[in-house]
Amino acid sequence: MKPNPYASCIDACVKCALACHHCSAACLKEADVSHMARCISLDMDCAAFCELTAAAMARESVNAKAICRVCAEVCDACADECARHEADHCQACAEACRSCAGECRQMVA
């Protein structure tokens, strides 16, 4: 089996999706969940989009670059929101989102 040309981007997307799932679950356990609503929503969107993006690249879809372009935007929005919160899980998620956005942009370039 030949190596996938998108391997590092796929890895970043999978890591980001996992970080987003973890962050949204942890946010739901915060004392003031309503304060975390936007974070949770963006985490869920980002996780779903990163999973879609990884799958598209894994099958070398003709739409992979277009999907990656949008994935970078979704990751940026999630990173910006998570970075606003001091919780370790939010900070880790923001970092994973930024890394994924960078990988996606590099793949598209």
Image (tube, grey):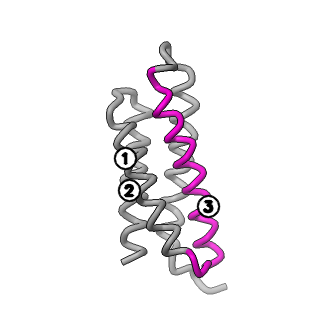
Measured from the top left, where is residue 84 in percent x and y?
32, 32
Residue beneath label 2, please? 99
Tell me if residue 60 is in the magenta stretch: yes
Mark 3 or mark 1, which is nearer to you?
A: 3
Tell whether position 20 is magenta: no
Between 62 and 23, the one lying in front of the other is 62
User: Where the N terminus falls, by quadrant?
Assistant: bottom right
Q: Quadrant of the C terminus?
A: bottom left
Viewed as shown, does residue 104 lie left or right of 63?
left
SS at mark 3 in the image: helix
25 vs 48, nearest the viewer: 48
Callout 2 touching callout 1 (CB < 8 Å): yes
Q: Amino acid at mark 2?
A: Ser
Q: Which residue is mark 1?
A: 95
Q: CA distance from mark 3 to mark 1?
A: 20 Å
Sequence order check: which comes first, mark 3 or mark 2?
3
Counting residues from the start of the chain, the first of labels 3 and 1 encountered is: 3
User: What is the span of residues highlighted in magenta in the rendered image?
Assistant: 35-63
In terms of secondary structure, where does tag 2 sit? helix
Crowd rating for badge 3 (residues with CA inside 10 Å; few <14, some 14–19, many 20+): some
**Magenta stretch, overall SS:** helix
* Residue ranking furthest to the top: 31
Residue underneath mark 3: 52
Kind of residue at badge 1? Glu
Q: Residue at x 41, y 40 (%)?
A: 92
Question: Which residue does the image show at 40% across and 65% down from the upper left?
Answer: 103
